[in-house]
Every structure is written in structure tokens, then in C-alpha cells.
Image (cartoon, rainbow, N blue to C red):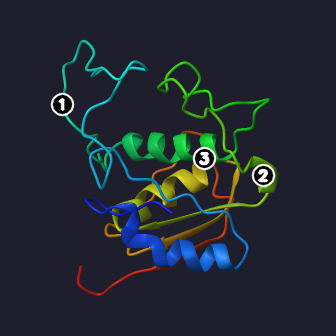
Amino acid sequence: MIPGLQAYNEVYDWVGEGLAEAGYMVLIPDPQGQGSSENLPHDPDGSIACGASGCSGPPVYDPASDQTQLVAVTSGLDFLLSTPAHPDPDAVGANAAGTLSYNPEWALLDPHEIGLAGHSNGAIAVTSAGQNDPRVKAVVSMDNLDGSITLAQGAKIHAPALYFGVDYA
């Protein structure tokens, strides 16, 4: 479940609780710079990792490329599907000492039944990412503010999608 812009994961507890009670495994991240997450990236030792480009704060959604959100959703999927034998490739060597590099509940997950849900800006992200990533089997898009989808070159729509919109646009 990907939160909307400037939302935090606790706003979506009702979604996660309902899905978990129905037997689903749910991951609701705090995107960088929202909720309890920080604005700036960190090195494994906890120091700030600004790199050559400096510290610009959290990623900003770019509707022209959709790359920032696509990377965020893909990273969540990588962690959700990680196991001790196949750790999250982004977490190995990048996380602080003692942080898990794989999903601790991996044995309970059916990797062939992965769905994405998102609200507002998160809906835009899951709509695109869900169709670009063959690991995703279903997409729920709640209040996708711009109603658009950007597919990667060569990607084909493969996952059924449920779209909820609003009339204020």
C-alpha cells in the first residue's frame, strides 16, 4: 500500500488491518521525507549520504518520467519478496548494522500472488509500476489524481486494475 503525497503509513492502517485480517501480507512504507522517514539518505554507518549532487531532500514525483515513484515501488517489492537465500539487493551492504536485508515473514508470502494498492500520488505510482513489473498480479488505484499511466518501453498491460476516482478534478 503506497501512501499519497505528504501522507504517512499510519493514515492507511485501516487498509492494512483489513487486508491482514483477510489473510494478506501488507507492507505500508513511509516514503522518504514523509511520516517517520527522514528527508536525507544515510550511509550504513548512519552518516548523511548526499553524494556529488548534494542534499536535495526527498524525491519529487516527476509525472513526465514517473521514475522516482517507480523506483520506490520496485524497492518495496524487492524487500517484500526477499528471503535469507535471496536478500534485497538494495539492502545488502546499504543498511545500518543489524538491519534485516530480507523480509522476516518471507515464508508466509506467496510470491506468485502480489498486488499493489496506492492512494493519490501512490495510486499514480502503483498504476504504472504494477504494469511495468511482471511480479505484480493486481493493482488497486485509489484517487489517481492525473488518471495517467506511463509504461516502460516494451512493457505490456498484464495485471487487472481497479480504479477509484473522484469528481473534483
The quadrant of the image that shows the C terminus is bottom left
**What kind of element bears circle 1?**
loop
Q: Position of residue 92 (x, y in %)?
A: 59, 23
Q: Is residue 132 left or right of residue 94?
A: right
Gap between marks 3 and 2 measured at Cα = 10 Å
Query: Which quadrant would residue 88 be assigned to in this image?
Result: top right
Mark earlier in primary sequence (2, 1)? 1
**What kind of element bears circle 2?**
loop
Q: Is residue 4 left or right of residue 12?
A: left
Disc number at residue 22?
A: none
Query: Which quadrant would residue 67 be assigned to in this image?
Result: top left
Q: Disc 2 designates what residue?
A: 111
In the image, what residue type sits under mark 2? Pro
Gap between marks 3 and 1 measured at Cα = 25 Å
Gap between marks 2 and 1 measured at Cα = 35 Å
In the image, what residue type sits under mark 1? Ser
Q: Position of residue 9 (x, y in %)?
A: 40, 62
The residue lying toward the viewer, choosing from 132 and 139, is 139
Q: Position of residue 128 (x, y in %)?
A: 50, 54
Mark earlier in primary sequence (3, 1)? 1
Q: Residue furthest bottom?
A: 167
Disc number at residue 56?
A: 1
In the image, what residue type sits under mark 3? Leu
Please count the marks in the image. Answer: 3
Q: Crowding at label 3, few (<14), some or many (≥20) Cα neighbours within 10 Å?
A: some
Q: Disc 3 designates what residue?
A: 77
